[in-house]
Image: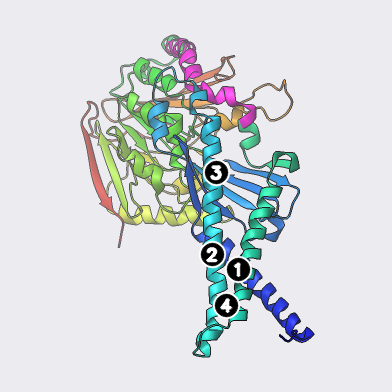
Amino acid sequence: MRRPSPATVVRVLLRTVLITVVALVTGVLTTIAWPAEVETPYYAASVHLSPDVSERGSIRSETIVGEIGVRFRGLAPGIVVAPRVKPEITDVLGRTGLDVAALTPTDAERERAVADAAKGVALRMALGAAAGCAIVLLGPALWRHGWPRRRDVVVAVAAWVIAFGGTALSIQRTYSPERVTSFTSTGLLDVLVANRALLQDVEHRAEQATPYLKNLLALSAALRQQYSPTDLDQAPALRILLVSDIHAANQYPLMRAVVEDQDIDLVIDSGDLINLGAVEEADLSGLFAGIESLRVPYVFVRGNHDANVPGVGPLVTRLRALDNVVLLQPEDRQYQELTHGGLRISGFNDPRYYGDADDEVARDQSAAREAYLAAFEGRPAPDLLVSHEEPAVDGIEAGVRIHGHGHVPRLAGNRIEVGTFTGGGLLSHFVTSGPDAELTSQPNSFDVLSYGSGCQLVSLTRYQYRQILEGRPTYDSVSIVNGAGIVEPPDDRVCGGDDHEVTVVPAAP
């Protein structure tokens, strides 16, 4: 047997390296196109290898509230994990007396999930690498209209062994606890970890604060009787609660106290029910059950935090299933006008969404406003117009124009900016530095509109308080504004009662 020439050896080695690289690339890409799926009773995840060389020796986990990264000593390909919550968790969260620790996977469940992920990724890597080797091996052979040469087959098998075996060995050696070099997190995960206790008992704290809020409402009633003009104290035909910017904090026990104590006929929410645009936030926070518990119509327009994609988004779709919810723009090309007790209410969603570019706000709001005006052309001006941001309601004829977004209650002519009902939600209450840092928040705020039997706005009552979640409720202010100074009374109309009619208004062609 003749010894191969040096040139032949070099060619074989170069071909082996080439096929190995192809096998590595196709193997990694296969894990991305066909990720391994693992699950525990309440969680699931997709796992694949990263093609980014800079991520070698690292495990990266992406969530809706940020990213976790763990780096190891070694040259193994990076691993990307995309976790998600399974629908079954919502049923568990609805149980009373739930210990949150029960939702944490056990050691056995975690070990099983890791083993399943390793097997799944290995299988996909092996098949992808084999496919890459086959392409390089069979392509030239088919071009020559023949079978691969024996030497080429040996080279391809060797390349597959190097690519797959080397990757498996490097992963095994790299990803062990003693080789960890750093841990990083981004977004909200750091503050989420620092405030686990706060997340676990938000609704309970809201229930504890209900007596305080009832005292505040009683105080405002006494002040109104003592100091307000006589015409502001007459029994109203309709009372409407204005809320905004809930931001995923389940303080619906407080809102329910307002609805019951103030004989509220209707709630209007001007958006930002959640934070990051994912409907799972509302499910896990119990917001849907809270809305249903109010037992009065709940009118809603989507805010810029209520979706993470263009269009109405899954949150609006989920709200549509609640019996007491009225969506003023349930679809991209459809609006709804509500007539309740004789008052006409219409509005439209915020076209922006969580994560979009923030440099064309005026343009986006103008387009949404013009679409609304085109759809409602020829219809009477509404008594209440609702959207999320101030530029959206500018220049529209209406009795009162309502929006949120700024978290600060303001009044400018007939434009009512509603403050945040929850003090900006959970995220504004997080401890951000130091083991003994105090929780801080902006004021909680809501408004009550009172209408008379002639459909005239009698009064706007504004409430502000703070530190509900911190356990130190503090009274800020109650103010009463004469409705005649906000909008002129209409002529020859009658309002009152609980008649409720929703009219579908299609978008203009």
Q: Which residue in the protein does label 3 denote?
A: 115
Q: Quadrant of residue 337?
A: top left
Q: CA distance from mark 1 to mark 2?
A: 7 Å
Query: What are the residue bounds of the magenta stretch?
Result: 193-221
Q: Which of disc 1 and disc 3 is earlier in sequence?
A: 1
Q: Position of residue 238 (x, y in %)?
A: 30, 25
Badge 4, how many Cα within 10 Å: few under 14, some, many 20+?
Answer: some
In the image, 8 versus 257, the foreground residue is 8
Q: Quadrant of residue 506?
A: bottom left
Q: Which residue in the protein does label 2 denote?
A: 128
Main SS of residues in magenta: helix
In the image, 58 versus 334, the foreground residue is 58
Q: Which residue in the protein does label 1 denote?
A: 23
Kindly indicate whether the residue at mark 2 contacts the one at mark 1 (C-beta within 8 angstroms).
yes
Image position of 99 with respect to 142: above or below: above
Q: Position of residue 98 (x, y in %)?
A: 45, 20
